[in-house]
Amino acid sequence: MTDSNIVQIRDVNVLAGGAPILKHIDLDIARNKITVLLGPSGCGKTTLLKCLNRLTDLHPQLEVSGTIKIDNEDIFHPDRDITEIRQKMGLLSQKPYPLPMSIYKNIAYGLKIQGIKDKLLIQRKVEQHLREVGLWEEVKDRLHSPAGKLSIGQQQRLCLARGLAVGPEIILADEPTSALDPISSRKIEEKFLELRNDYTLIVVTHILRQARRLADHIVFMYFGEIIESGTPDRLFGDPKSDILKEYLLSGH
């Protein structure tokens, strides 16, 4: 694997009760880029995301085979520490799930997971990560109020900040703006574009406009398979497969 690729996926298959969810997935994901997994609901995008941080382990009915290497280390190797794998990845779900505690403690929690105990360092890092997601100015005067009192858009940015506090290399985002209003969605997108300077982002979406705005590289999936992949200009401007052409015409 070259230094430019942080993830290498080879012949990954996922079965649920014998029925295929993912079929022969081969994919390289570039470091410090935004890779968008695009496709209709139920095509396997979220399952592929779950393979990357081994959340598939939580579903005993799933059979996973193949190889995924992150930083050239096989994440399915029996000696690999799952906690360590997951700490390499910040996860942003469709719906924000802040912890039932203060704004400050939501971020401090991620720092303490890393073993940071110095209170001054924690304070500095909390501010740093809230600034990274553009939330500091909005919450600096109410850091000790419940995170649940934030708007849903602010909660999603807080969850992003909490993910960054774990010190990840990769940010996994599963339909991260689907529950948000247009203004909050645009803020999340703007932050993603900034964050790719320091992180690798893998974003699941079915929204064509979002894929075009965000992606350095798009992977179009359909019924568990990768149909086409390439730059937004190539996929939107010169689709090769009839399936992608129909999807683009449907205007999702």
Image (tube, helix red, strand yellow):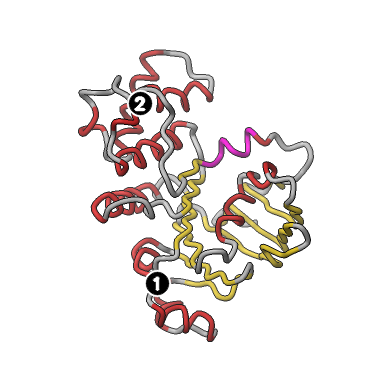
- Point 67% across, 36% down: residue: 82
Instruction: Decide whether residue 87 is among the magenta residues.
Output: yes
Which amino acid type is marked by label 2? Val
- Residue 234 visible to the viewer: no
Give the labeled residue for mark 1: 252
The residue singled out by tag 2 in the image is 126
Q: Find residue 72 and report its horizontal and vertical position in percent.
A: 67, 49
The residue shown at (63%, 48%) is 70
Q: Earlier in the sequence, mark 2 or mark 1?
A: 2
Q: Where in the figure is residue 80, as x and y percent of width and height?
A: 72, 37
Quarter the N terminus occupies: bottom right
Q: Which portion, as a residue range, is magenta?
A: 83-89
Residue 39 magenta-drawn?
no
Q: Residue at x 52, y 67 (%)?
A: 219
Find numbered disc 2 in the image and state the secondary structure of the residue it sits on: helix
Quick check: 65 left or right of 113?
right
Element at badge 1?
A: loop
Q: Which disc number belongs to residue 196?
A: none
Q: Amino acid at mark 1?
A: His
Task: Return the x and y of residue 77 as percentages of the image width and height.
Answer: 77, 43
